[in-house]
Image (cartoon, rainbow, N blue to C red):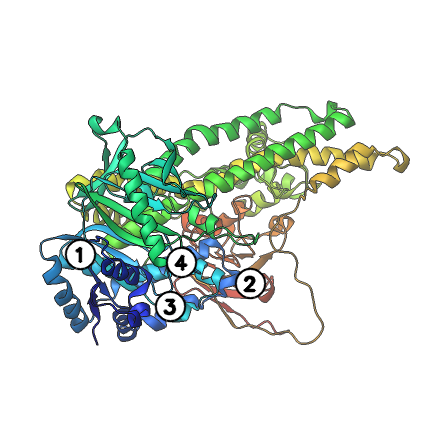
Amino acid sequence: MNWIMSTEEIQSADRHRVGGKGYALSLLVKKGFKIPKTVCLTSDIYQEYVLRTGLRERVLLELHRKDFKEMRWEEIWDCAARIRNLFLTKPMPVDLEEEIRNGISIPFRGKTVAVRSSAPDEDDAKSSFAGLHESFINVAGEESILKHIRLVWSSLWSDAALLYRQEIGLDVEKSSMAVVIQETVAGGRSGVAFTRNPNDENQGIIESVYGLNQGLVDGTVEPDRWILDRAHNTIVSHTAPERKHWIIPSQNGVHLAELPEDKSAHPPLNPQEVNFIFETARKAEEFFKMPQDVEWTYDNDRLILLQSRPITTLRSDKPEDKRSWYLSLHRSFDNLKDLRRKIEDELIPAMISTAEKLKTKNLMKLSDKALAAEIKKRWAINHEWVNTYWAEFIPYAHGVRLFGQVYNDTIHPDDPYEFIDLLTNTDMASIARNNMMMDLAAMIRSDSNLTEKLKQGDDSDLDGKFLSMVNEFIDKFGDLSCAVTGGKNCVLGTGPLYRLLLEMAGHPAKINGRQKSDRIDQLYQKYLGSFEADQRVWAEELLELARSSYQLRDDDNIYLGRIEAHLLAAVQEAKRRLQDQNVDQVAEVLSQVLEEVDFRTESKGSTPAVETPGYKLQARQLIGQPAGPGIAKGKARVVQRHSDLADFKHGEVLVCDAVDPNITFVVPLAAAVVERRGGMLIHGAIIAREYGLPCITGIPDATTLIQTGVEITVDGYLGIVTLGDTRN
């Protein structure tokens, strides 16, 4: 069987074997279009590789750890990361490697190449995987080409590709991947041509940048943009960006560089070239009998087509279709650097300032009408910041994933999450809160008189220093009675804070367990030592960005919670007034506004399990995702609502739907953490690793299959929870 084919050899019967991209290129060649020298590795090689290495079964195991429809974006990312690492660490069988070497040695000896995906399902009239599978530019040497072939194969299982297959109903178990290898054309000008504008069928679009196309595709370099009239092939408009950078070849791929001044003042294309590119793309449209998205480059004055595919859109009329949102989570390094500056220099200071301004308002002095207006105002402010959280903070989490991918691609560790150890031990806001609690607990521990007063619920005449610290804590983080950071007085009496402080005081202090260690230093040196000297500054910057991204993944909810707490305070004041008045004197304006905002004071996590008649299935072992190494045993404390946290005892295992930063104050008491929601980047996993606790995430129905008081063993290495005998 011919497993490696030139574009001239490909026939119509080979369409599924060479994929949409490979087949389209073969048709372009036969029609006389100019393309780079190209060969296709058929999907047969992929199938042989995964079959003989056992990867087929390993991939299916990862895909079936949990029902895909129940996975959140964090879990999809994790699944994809584990699969990618399997491809990186599983060597190519010798005869397959020799087959590939023989197929690429003659056409590409001494040349750099682009290694591109060409999935059999992609680039047809019904689906487009544009941007979902990986392609690599300017790859040099046979060893590097072989590595990048495996990376293209692994991108068949990227998080975005998995989601897309699920959305359009493709069978993930039957998915396959061909690979296109093209000689690099180091064009001085590149771009894309859309023969039909997705927003106006009477127009076409040309976009162009100086240098290679990668900057345009990943959003790093803003292109010049021309709108054309399809009927007359005339330019309707030209939008010129501020031309600052271009992507150019480097020794190890490509890099972003400053654009020379002689180019920045002029667009990459003149009007005649714009028209010629559009005419060429229209010929491809006529040939393929559907509108085309054509990627091109100029080699001196010669127009070269790199690929052509049907124009499809990821937009959908279905409100549940989140493919576009998932794709937006993937950001380039430069995009993430800009996002970091915006978050750290603008958004976080603005959130802090907003919370401080809201705190100055005396709600008790407001009239009912003014209080209702204040609630609406605070609801709008909170809503705006929630939208900002999803639009800015969530995409910034990709900084961790980008670092993890670079680390794994470079180091090839057996553990795909080894890189996480370089990100822990940060100055998280939730850690600062917990440290304040432990300082207060230490004061209680050393003062028997204070201990007895708090046990008896007598908070009168407390030590001045202790009371001052308590007030400072409540001012920053609330009294822990509410499901939002900074919330106060959601329950009456002594309150959860004193109960938890007494519990902490009764046991030795626990500090976050991920302190700086020789192992961390070794990982750091191994990471930096894997880069050439001229790349180490970039590698260090990427690590620092990932640490910032990792910390913010926890901190953002603390900042957001403080704003939400002021909305809660206004709602509580309205409810207090309504309870204090007679029915016939109820202020309608307050009742109405409370119905409009529908604000809940309890956690939005899981709800209590409903008992159903009949027999009950008793699980013995539950399987999830290992998210924090270690083994621990303890009684389960199942947290169904925020108020359950006040009863947490030292040495218990925290079991919940999802830990969020507003409840992580009990983690210093916990022996381990178990969550229904999955992912290495969810808050419970992050805080558990900060304290060195075993953690398992992604256990379906964890809060119903595990009961409070049952002794469980948590194996954070394998992701297994073993339940003790629950029979009476």
User: Residue 702's mark?
Assistant: 2
Determine crowd level at label 1: few under 14, some 14-19, many 20+ residues with C-alpha closer than 10 A: some
Are the residues flagged by discs 3 and 1 in contact, CB closer than 8 Å? Answer: no
* First-in-chain label (1 vs 2): 1
Q: Is residue 442 visible?
A: no
* Secondary element type, mark 3: loop
Q: Nearer the viewer, residue 391 or 249?
A: 249
Of the residues tagged 3 and 2, which is closer to the observer? 3
Q: Mark 1 falls on what kind of element?
A: loop
Instruction: Residue type at mark 3: give it.
Output: Ser
Q: Which residue is mark 3?
A: 175
Contact between labelled residues 2 and 3, with CB atoms less than 8 Å apart: no
Which of label 4 and label 2 is nearer to you? 4
> Is residue 64 in view?
yes
Specify which label sits upstream in the sequence, 3 or 2: 3
Name the amino acid type tagged 4.
Ala
In the image, residue 612 lies at what x, y percent? Answer: 70, 69
* x and y percentages locating residue 165 in the rendered image: 44, 62
